[in-house]
Image (tube, grey):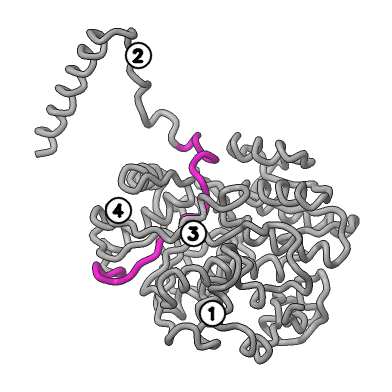
């Protein structure tokens, strides 16, 4: 059995039963899961976690289910990679990548939240799941709905990357493309939810769904040897992940699993859709919605649902917010691939590029332990790199043909070397 008492409003603290709702009926504040932490303290230890499965479900007592998980049993516990080569390029001695680009089953951190959301939807008795998505969530909902034997109807903004569209359709989902931005799609889904008894994972199931992201933070702390890092750089879309990593660290502190949390949390966005980082840089707590215009489509949310709390998280932790251009995103994607052999999607390019900028600004110090969040796989956003590389050399299947092209390539690289000097 789980340790969920119900839901509670983040603003007025009114309590609710465990239901598929997400907004307080009194103050219209967002609802979050209300845990029985006294009960959790009696059962959760380092040993109990370490003896659990090699997945996010080693933290099951801290996640919002009342029954055993139904899907995503192999999700999570992704690598925390010591990034020495990238660290050298950025001037950081203790740099790590939390690499959810290899997460099961659809290669993004969204598999964590969806495994919780669909398991919870099944507890509530829903037979159809749905979502508004910029791509990764669509993939994960479609895949895990198929695993669960549920119907799925998924809504995306028109113009998403082909890999994310195919990566949703392949699971047999009903996919609907909506003319407009993610925010338009999300508003439409809220209206559809009034007429259809569906589990919208990021609307009526949102309080439970969001807490799946806590596992990302738990893993960072455990994989660092039960320590929290000095800095975490987080891609920001709706602002749920950034708040849940912070919450996870503080839950571990409250349970006595880590020492006092002194981590600075940094929000990373693309300049073409940066309502959260713009507010942070302007010293404001208020989000001014924007119309997205960036290649980083997976984090292109112009009016983020938890934007206010994302700002508070960065500020309260002593962190900051920064954004980079599309050109800088592509450059950072290439840098990560060339130094660490990790092919990330555009959101990962954002976090790597923002980290580089934060180091240059002196906000991240060379000897601090820094974790960059890599939340999705580059195979999903290949369009972002279109035109960045030359076509491969074509030769005859003869040694002379190879030696001829090899000589030319050697001369080319030699000229480049001296040019750099």
Q: Residue lying at the far bottom in this picture: please name it.
A: 38
Q: Tag 3 or tag 4, which sits nearer the N-term?
A: 4
Q: Counting other residues with Cα less than 10 Å from the Cα at mark 3, is it few (<14), some (14-19), or many (20 or more)? A: many
Is residue 312 at all visible to an observer of this figure? no
Give residue 47's mark: 1
What residue is drawn where x is 39% and y is 53%?
324
What residue is drawn where x is 25% and y is 70%?
367
- Asked whether disc 1 touches disc 2, contact meaning CB atoms under 8 Å apart, the reply is no
The quarter of the picture where the C terminus appears is: top left
- CA–CA distance in space, label 1 to label 2: 56 Å
Q: Tag 4 or tag 2, which sits nearer the N-term?
A: 4
- CA–CA distance in space, label 3 to label 1: 31 Å
- In front of the other: 43 or 369: 43
The residue wearing badge 2 is 394
| Residue 111 in the image, given as x and y percentages of width and height | 63, 55
- CA–CA distance in space, label 2 to label 3: 39 Å
The residue wearing badge 3 is 235
Q: Is residue 144 left or right of residue 245?
A: right
Per the image, label 3 sits on a secondary structure element best described as strand
What residue is drawn where x is 57% and y is 68%?
215
The residue wearing badge 4 is 86
Q: Is 18 situated above or below 182? A: below
> In the image, which residues are magenta?
363-384
Q: Tag 1 or tag 4, which sits nearer the N-term?
A: 1
Per the image, label 4 sits on a secondary structure element best described as helix
Quarter of the image holding residue 186?
Answer: bottom right
Front label number (3 vs 1): 1
What residue is drawn where x is 17% and y is 23%?
410
- CA–CA distance in space, label 4 to label 3: 18 Å
Asked if residue 369 lies in the magenta stretch, the reply is yes
């Amino acid at each position: 059995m789980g340790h969920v008492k119900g839901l509670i409003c983040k603003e007025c603290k009114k309590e609710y039963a465990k239901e598929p709702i997400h907004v307080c009926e009194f103050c219209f504040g967002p609802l979050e899961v209300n845990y029985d932490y006294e009960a959790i303290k009696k059962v959760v230890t380092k040993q109990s976690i370490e003896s659990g499965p090699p997945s996010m479900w080693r933290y099951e007592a801290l996640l919002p289910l009342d029954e055993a998980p139904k899907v995503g049993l192999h999700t999570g516990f992704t690598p925390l990679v010591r990034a020495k080569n990238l660290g050298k390029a950025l001037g950081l001695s203790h740099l790590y990548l939390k690499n959810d680009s290899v997460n099961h089953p659809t290669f993004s951190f969204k598999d964590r939240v969806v495994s919780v959301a669909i398991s919870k939807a099944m507890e509530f008795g829903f037979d159809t799941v749905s979502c508004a998505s910029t791509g990764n969530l669509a993939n994960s909902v479609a895949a895990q709905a198929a695993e669960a034997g549920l119907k799925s109807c998924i809504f995306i903004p028109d113009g998403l990357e082909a890999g994310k569209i195919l990566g949703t359709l392949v699971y047999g989902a009903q996919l609907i493309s909506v003319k407009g931005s993610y925010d338009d799609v999300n508003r439409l889904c809220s209206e559809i939810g009034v007429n259809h008894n569906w589990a919208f994972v990021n609307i009526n199931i949102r309080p439970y769904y969001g807490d799946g992201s806590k596992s990302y933070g738990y893993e960072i702390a455990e994989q660092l040897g039960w320590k929290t890092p000095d800095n975490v750089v987080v891609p920001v879309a709706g602002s749920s992940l950034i708040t849940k990593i912070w919450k996870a660290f503080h839950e571990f502190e409250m349970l006595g699993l880590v020492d006092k949390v002194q981590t600075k949390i940094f929000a990373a966005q693309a300049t073409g859709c940066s309502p959260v980082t713009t507010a942070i840089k302007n010293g404001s707590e208020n989000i001014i919605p924007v119309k997205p215009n960036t290649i980083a489509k997976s984090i292109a949310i112009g009016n983020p649902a938890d934007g206010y709390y994302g700002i508070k998280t960065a500020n309260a932790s002593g962190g900051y917010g920064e954004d980079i251009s599309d050109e800088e995103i592509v450059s950072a994607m290439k840098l990560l691939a060339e130094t660490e052999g990790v092919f990330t999607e555009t959101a990962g390019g954002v976090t790597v590029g923002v980290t580089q900028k934060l180091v240059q600004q002196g906000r991240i110090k060379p000897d601090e332990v820094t974790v960059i969040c890599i939340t999705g796989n580059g195979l999903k956003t290949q369009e972002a790199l279109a035109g960045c590389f030359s076509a491969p050399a074509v030769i005859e299947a003869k040694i002379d043909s190879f030696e001829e092209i090899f000589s030319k390539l050697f001369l080319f690289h030699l000229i480049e070397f001296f040019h750099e000097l």
